[in-house]
Amino acid sequence: MPRAGTFTHSKTIAGLATLTFAAWSATAIPAGAQTLSWRQYESVSRPQGPVPCTKLRDAEQQVADDFQQMKDVDAQLNENRDEISQSNTGTGWQALANGAIGMAAITDSINASHRIEASEDIARQQLDYFHTLEAGCLNDAQAIAQAAGIDTSSHVDKEATPTGYVRRTFDGGIEVEDAFFTRDGQPDAPEGYARVTMQWGLDHSLDTRWFDVHNAPVLVKGVARTLVAFSEHGEPLQQDNFGVDGKPILDPDGCARKTWVYDETSNNKAEESCYNADGTLRLNTAGFARVRYQFPPVMNAMDPLATTWFGVDGKPMLYKGCARLAQTRADDNELQVTGEACYGAQGQPIVGPNGYFRLARSFASVAHVKEETYYGPDNQPIIRADVGYARIDYTYDADDDNVTRTDLFGADLKPIIGKDGFASHIQTYTQDHLPLIDLYLGADGKPILSPKDGYASKVLTYDAGGFQVSEAYTDAAGKPMVSKAGFATETFRRDKDGNILEDTMTDAGGRLMDGPQGYAHSLWKQDAKGNAVEIDYFAADGSPARAFAVERMSYDDKNQVVADAYFTVTGQPATYSDGYSRVTYVYNEANNPVPTYYNAAGGVIADPHK
């Protein structure tokens, strides 16, 4: 038995309307009649429970189409019976033979007509039955909810809010109203409105309205009412915005109406437009009237290949320096953007906001860029103004994990010193990928002082366990220097487990110097679990550090620090360089520390790191 929405479209008898008497045989019509869809209409299909409205409408249309075809075929059969009965060809036995064949064909045709008439009656009853289901059919949201096993009954839920409660009303499992109340039952507007209604239409529309505590329309995020039309797949196609007076109003994006178009292959938004109330294009608050995206022809593509912006005249316009921004990507990896180009309103190459017309990029691996070059509208290399070079090259280690060299080039593709003050940056690593050497070079390939980091090279050393034991800085001549870190060399003495026992900072001459936190030397004490519980700080002259001389830490049973405090040499609370004296930690459900900071007087202060 057929089910609603699953009927097969009817088929016609090939050549039935053009058959001639000479073509008839005793079995021609019955054989052809077997292919007609009337054979499906043996009884009325009665689906159990509500059906989705779209499926019901589709089923109704299909039955109506089949019904019309039955009538058409029946008319053809009548026409051909008349043709047979009026024919009188041949003589003698030929005439008798033709007459016998014709009578047999007419008999079969009449039988077929009777069957069609019976099927027509069933189809007519099917349509009548479907019409009775229309009032109770499910809209798309209800159908989706029901398919997901969600309660689709009509009911009211109450949910507590900080100031009272919200009453949520459901109709057929679909939320149709939220109303907020105070604890004593008075209308409340904790989010700027006291009530919101949501009405779903059978035409895939959602009418949402907001009201204040007096049940008068109220603006919420700039609108009092939105009417949104959706596709059968649930994507918004059009949104109209209205004010408290019921008239069209501009939303926060500057649009009285918005429309969207979707890319069928990638399922992404392909176009978005902004309109006045009269349906004419208008500039949104971002500065364009329409934006169009072109996606690669693959399922679920994430990023567009091209973006074009349009003005109120529907023609391309400059937006943030480009009217059209186009990309090229590697064929086998959508994430690898191999090129980008900026075009003007007339489609011509132009210098975009980043100072170039286009860039070309190659990759060393799936995720790592090997080379990037910038070009002007003449397709010649051009120096990108914000970085100071026309091309940048990257070299990676054998495992392709770390950048070991970065080289910059000018428009002539010769080495150039970029905005960051170097032409080449060299980084080396241990076999365990720990950083060893950080070195900056000029255009001549010689060491150069980096104005950003304040040194020409930084060298780290490690013990046999892989724990850092020193950090040293040198200038362009390779001599020790005090960097922006506040020292020339810092050394660590550790125990066999890597715990710090001693920390020392020296200047370019190897002499103790007070570092950025106000001490030159520190001694560390650990508990039996290896947790640092006390640190004593000393100045370069060997005396206790002036700002704070002692730091003490305490831990919970999970070895998580719960308190960290600073003291003077006499045991009085002291202020750390970040502006607090003590910090305590509690751990949330995700086991992340939540700090509370205190000053030397014991008062709670704001987080100094925010």
Image: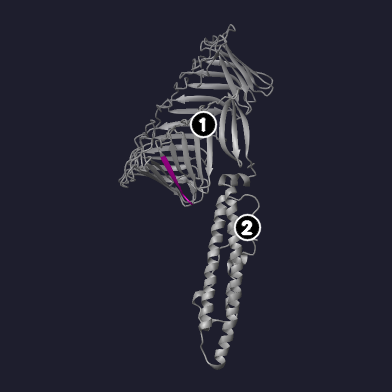
Q: Tell me the amino acid under the disc marked 1.
A: Leu
Predominant secondary structure, magenta span? strand
Q: Is residue 563 above or below residue 161?
A: above
Location of residue 345 (image quadrant)? top left
Where does residue 135 sit, x and y in percent of width and height? 58, 48
Whichever of labels 2 and 1 marks the residue nearer the N terminus, that label is 2
Which residue is outermost to the bottom?
Answer: 92
| Label annotation for residue 3 | 2
> Dot 2: what SS?
loop
Instruction: Judge by depth and name the residue closer to the eye, 311 or 10.
Output: 10
Q: Tell me the amino acid under the disc marked 2.
A: Arg
Q: At 65% from the left edge and 62% from the top edge, which residue is drawn?
A: 43
Task: Please say if the residues under marks 2 and 1 sit with CB atoms less than 8 Å apart.
Answer: no
Does residue 346 belong to the magenta stretch?
no
Locate residue 468 relative to residue 253 in the image: left or right.
right
Q: Is residue 116 above or below residue 505?
A: below
> Dot 1: what SS?
strand
Separation of marks 2 and 1 at Cα, in angstroms: 73 Å
Where does residue 333 sit, x and y in percent of width and height? 49, 48
> Which residue is disc 1 drawn over?
436
Magenta residues, as a range? 257-264
Where does residue 169 sit, x and y in percent of width and height? 59, 35
Location of residue 252 (image quadrant)? top left
Location of residue 108 (image quadrant)? bottom right
Instruction: Judge by depth and name the residue closer to the eye, 485 or 104.
Output: 104
Which residue is outermost to the top?
Answer: 570
